[in-house]
Amino acid sequence: MNNDLEIFRDEVLLALAEVTDIRAWDAIRVNTLGKSGKLTALLRSLGGMSPEIRKERGQALNRLRDELAHCFEERKRVLEKAAIEARLQAERVDVSLPPPPCLGGERQGFLHPISRTIEEIRSIFGTMGFSVEEGPDIETDWYNFSALNTPDHHPARTDHDTFYLSPRQPTESEQQEIPQKIHLLRTQTSGVQIRTLLAKKPPLRIIAPGRVYRADHDATHSPMFHQCEGLVIEQGITLSHLKGCLTDFLRAFFDRPRLPVRFRASYFPFTEPSLEVDIGWSRQTGEIGNGADWLEVLGAGMVHVRVLANCGIDPREWQGFAFGMGLERLTMLKNGISDVRSFFENDIRWLRYYGTNPFEAVL
Ligand code: PHE
C-alpha cells in the first residue's frame, strides 16, 4: 500500500479506537466513508491519474475501503454492547432492599386471608410431593359432572345449585352438527382431576386451588367461594394413605400435632368408598382440637374406577384417592371469622385486621 494511504488508514483506525459513543463514531464514519468523506475524495481523484497508476491505486483504495468498512462495523458492535451494559448497570434494581417507607404503615398492602390459606396449603402439600394444577372457572358439564360419574338426575346439576351459561346462538352450519356443549360456572374443583388425568400420565400427586360457584347466599354460603382439590394416582394406593395424608395435612394446617381427625362414610359420585372428614372442636368456645364436638372440613374418597376409565387409565394398574375442601371454611375456623360474606365485602378495616404482611414468610 502507498505510504500516504497507510498514514490515512492509521489515522482513521486510531480515531476509531478512541471513540467512545455512537454519535462520535458516526461523525468519523461520515468523514471517512460518506459522500464527501476523505476516502471518497481519494477514489474520485483517481480520474486524473494515468491508467497504470489508476489501476494499482484503485485496487489499493478498494481494499482499504473494504477494510475500513469492516473496522467501522466491528467498532459499532462493541460500542452498542457497551451502551447496553452501561444502561443495565445504571438501571439496576436491588431486589433485596427493604420496601421504601411509603409502603410501610398505613399504606401497606395485605395478603387476603384466602390467598394466605392457599399459600399455606401449597406449602404443606409441597413438602409431600404435590404439584399445583389449575382449571378454568367456566367449565363444560362434561368436566364438571359427566366425566366425574355424576348421573344426569343428580340434584347438583339442577339450576338451583349450578349457574348455567346461556348457550350461544348457533350459526346455520352448526345447527346441523352435533349438539352444543353446555357451559357452566364450575361448582367444584373436581373437574381439574379429569383435566389432569387426561393431560398427564400417572403416577401423579396434585392439588388444584381455585374459585367455584353455587347459587347460595347466607352467613355460611357465598355464591363464589374457593376449594382446593387433591388427587393422588399411584400403584398400590389404599385408604390408609388417604387417611395418613389428610391427617398430616390437617394437623399441620391447624398447627395442632394431636388434632383429633375422624373419617365418616359418605357419598360422592366420583369416589368409592367416599368419606367425610371431621376435626375435633368445641362448638361452645370455637376452640379447635379441644372439645367433644366434630366439625366437617373435607370430602374425600378412593377415585372411582369409572372416573379412571373415563380418562383412559387402567384401574387394575393404578389406584388413588381424591379430596376436596372449602377454603373459606378452613380460613374461618383458623381465624375465628363467623360470616363468610365478610371475605368479599372489601371492607378495608376487615382486610387490615385479617390480612397478612406479604413480606412475612409463610410457615
Ligand atoms: N367436590 C366435592 C364437593 O364439592 C368434594 C370432594 C372432592 C369429594 C374430591 C371427594 C373427592 O363437595
Image (tube, rainbow, N blue to C red):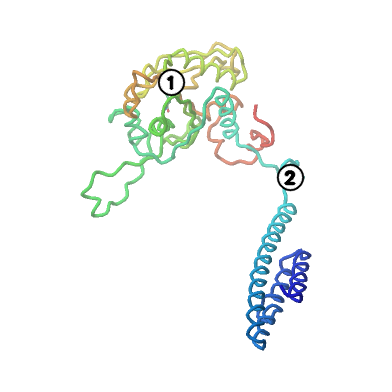
For label 1, the residue is 234
Local secondary structure at mark 1: strand
Left or right of 112? Residue 322 is: left
Residue at screen point 32% across, 27% down:
149
x and y percentages locating residue 322 in the rendered image: 43, 23
Question: Which class describes the residues within 10 Å of circle 2: few (<14), some (14-19), or many (20+)?
Answer: few
Residue where numbered disc 2 is placed: 94
Q: Position of residue 259 (x, y in %)?
A: 58, 14
Q: Quadrant of residue 353?
A: top right
* Residue 71: % across, % down: 68, 65
Image quarter in which the C terminus is found = top right
- The amino acid pointed to by label 2 is Asp
Q: Residue furthest bottom?
A: 48
**Where does residue 213 sit, x and y in percent of width and height?**
44, 36
The mark nearer the N terminus, 2 or 1, is 2
Cα gap from disc 2 to disc 1, whole angstroms = 44 Å
